[in-house]
Amino acid sequence: MVPYEYYVALSGLLMVLGLIGIIIRKNLIAMLLATELMLNAVNIAFVAFDMKLFDVSGQVFVFFILTIAAAEAAVGLGLIMAIYRLRKDVDVNTLTELKL
């Protein structure tokens, strides 16, 4: 059986990669994917700590986080498609203005 410390380390690595993806990327779709990566890192951490503590409450949180991530992906992609139809570009630097 794999020790839970490996899962926590994997979770931390995925969180850092997602944070770097948010900071470095200028494309909204890549930023959305980096956000999903960070949410999955939190899910791995919850399951790892559940494995250590022999509790199932973290798995309930994982279920809710997956639900929120699915809704965030659907709404985010819808907004990105609407922005692309108006601007013909999804670059973050060109979307700094609030007015269309």
Image (cartoon, rainbow, N blue to C red):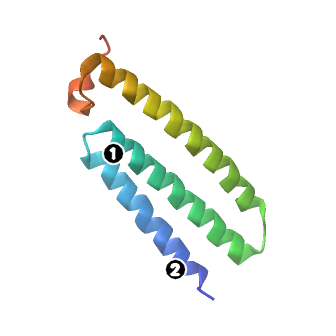
Mark 2 vs mark 1: give the one in front.
1
Q: Which mark is residue 85?
A: none
Question: As displayed, is residue 86 above or below residue 23?
Answer: above
Name the residue rendered at 39%, 55% in the picture: 18
Residue type beneath disc 2:
Tyr
Mark 1 lies on a secondary structure that is helix
Residue type beneath disc 1:
Ala
Q: Is residue 43 left or right of residue 60?
A: left
Question: As displayed, is residue 11 above or below residue 91?
Answer: below
| Residue that numbered label 1 is attached to | 30
Name the residue rendered at 41%, 67% in the picture: 13
Q: Is residue 5 left or right of residue 1?
A: left
Q: Is residue 6 left or right of residue 54?
A: left
> In the image, residue 8 lies at what x, y percent?
53, 72
Judged from this view, the residue extending furthest toward the bottom is: 1
| Residue that numbered label 2 is attached to | 6
**Frontmost residue, 2 versus 82:** 82
